[in-house]
């Protein structure tokens, strides 16, 4: 049984470095193609495992070369892959372009990730109940995430959800999350969907608005600026250390994996977020997603 049970996607990341990202109708030349292990669920699981946590991943991959590659990479990183099932759909793929300043554009073909089901969650009910933290992300069907959160809450397990990409969830699910993790764009989308308000991207105003929706606790990631946490009606900014970004791919997943590690160890949300900000900052100084994630000894 693992301390952290991650529910989410597993993708093959097909990465090309470019000078500028192409506009509509434009073709640009890039670097040689790199195939890396990715997907938000897999990334978060690897980030947590590299920091020393015991982690299981509930996900789906295809019966293809990309799927075999992902399983091998996850296993090598120390993630328990017993709950990763094989689908008759192709393994998910993320098409990623990265510019010299480290910024990226990503298109995801979900494939097998869309085949993950409520029945798959039920099959792991004992694993969920034995965990300290359930960590989910939104590249799998919303009904799967909501059911996993329900099981976690029933078992007294702390549910943490990274609502990326922005996805509609029920009010009871949002209210159960501790915390909900979003970036500024996802926070604004979620608030607009539930209230119709077209707010500016001021993080504190977004946090207050989401608090009025009943969100129990919240983390808004702010990229190079760090993160803002909100709980008990109070907001606090957690600054990030200054670094030179090489590749921001998977930085948010590094943050979430690290956050779950510290929460599973009993840290406060503020302390967990401060730790996660440091992990994410290290990750952007290196190319790739999972390959950029630090080990625990690098944080000492």
Image (spheres, rainbow, N blue to C red):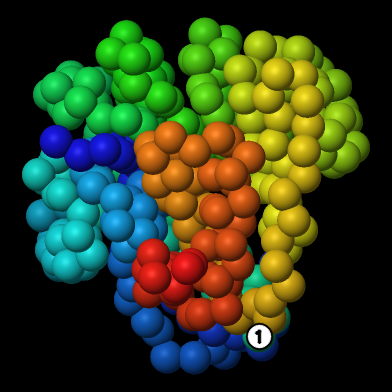
Q: Is 277 situated left or right of 205 in this image? A: left
Residue at x 41%, y 24% (from the top left corner): 158
- Residue 192 appears anywhere in the view: no
Which image quarter holds the N terminus?
top left
Pick the front one: 140 or 163:
163
| Residue 164 screen position, x and y as percent | 54, 41
Indicate the quadrant where residue 33 lies.
Answer: bottom left
Residue at x 28%, y 13% (from the top left corner): 155
- Residue 278 appears anywhere in the view: yes
Q: Is 232 situated left or right of 68 in this image? A: right
| Residue 251 screen position, x and y as percent | 54, 61
**Number of on-image labels:** 1
| Residue 81 screen position, x and y as percent | 14, 49
The residue wearing badge 1 is 100
Q: Secondary structure at mark 1?
A: loop
Indicate the quadrant where residue 189 lies.
Answer: top right
Crowdedness near tag 1: few (<14), some (14–19) or many (≥20) residues, C-alpha within 10 Å? few
Residue at x 78%, y 25% (from the top left corner): 234
In this picture, is 90 found above or below 65?
A: above
Pick the front one: 89 or 256:
256
Residue at x 26%, y 38% (from the top left corner): 3
In this picture, is 233 found above or below 68?
A: above
| Residue 212 screen position, x and y as percent | 76, 13
């Amino acid at each position: 049984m693992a301390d952290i049970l991650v529910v989410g996607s597993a993708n093959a990341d097909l990465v090309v470095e470019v000078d500028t990202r192409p506009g509509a109708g434009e073709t640009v030349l890039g670097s040689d193609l790199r195939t890396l292990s990715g997907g938000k669920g897999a990334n978060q699981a690897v980030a947590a495992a590299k920091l020393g946590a015991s982690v299981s991943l509930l996900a789906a991959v295809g019966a293809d070369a990309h799927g075999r590659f992902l399983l091998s990479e996850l296993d090598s990183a120390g993630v328990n892959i017993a709950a990763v099932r094989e689908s008759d759909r192709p393994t998910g793929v993320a098409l990623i372009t990265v510019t010299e300043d480290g910024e990226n554009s990503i298109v995801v073909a979900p494939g097998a990730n869309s085949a993950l089901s409520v029945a798959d969650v039920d099959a792991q009910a004992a694993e969920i109940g034995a965990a300290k933290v359930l960590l989910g992300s939104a590249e799998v069907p919303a009904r799967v995430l909501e059911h996993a959160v329900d099981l976690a809450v029933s078992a007294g397990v702390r549910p943490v959800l990274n609502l990326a990409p922005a996805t509609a969830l029920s009010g009871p699910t949002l209210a159960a999350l501790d915390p909900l993790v979003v970036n500024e764009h996802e926070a604004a989308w979620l608030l607009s969907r539930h209230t119709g308000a077209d707010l500016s991207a001021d993080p504190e105003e977004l946090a207050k608005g989401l608090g009025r929706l009943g969100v129990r606790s919240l983390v808004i990631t702010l990229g190079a600026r760090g993160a803002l946490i909100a709980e008990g009606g109070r907001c606090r900014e957690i600054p990030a250390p200054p670094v030179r970004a090489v590749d921001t791919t998977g930085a948010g997943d590094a943050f979430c994996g690290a956050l779950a590690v510290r929460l599973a160890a009993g840290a406060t949300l503020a302390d967990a977020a401060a730790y996660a900000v440091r992990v994410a900052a290290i990750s952007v100084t290196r190319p790739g997603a999972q390959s950029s994630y630090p080990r625990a000894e690098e944080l000492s």
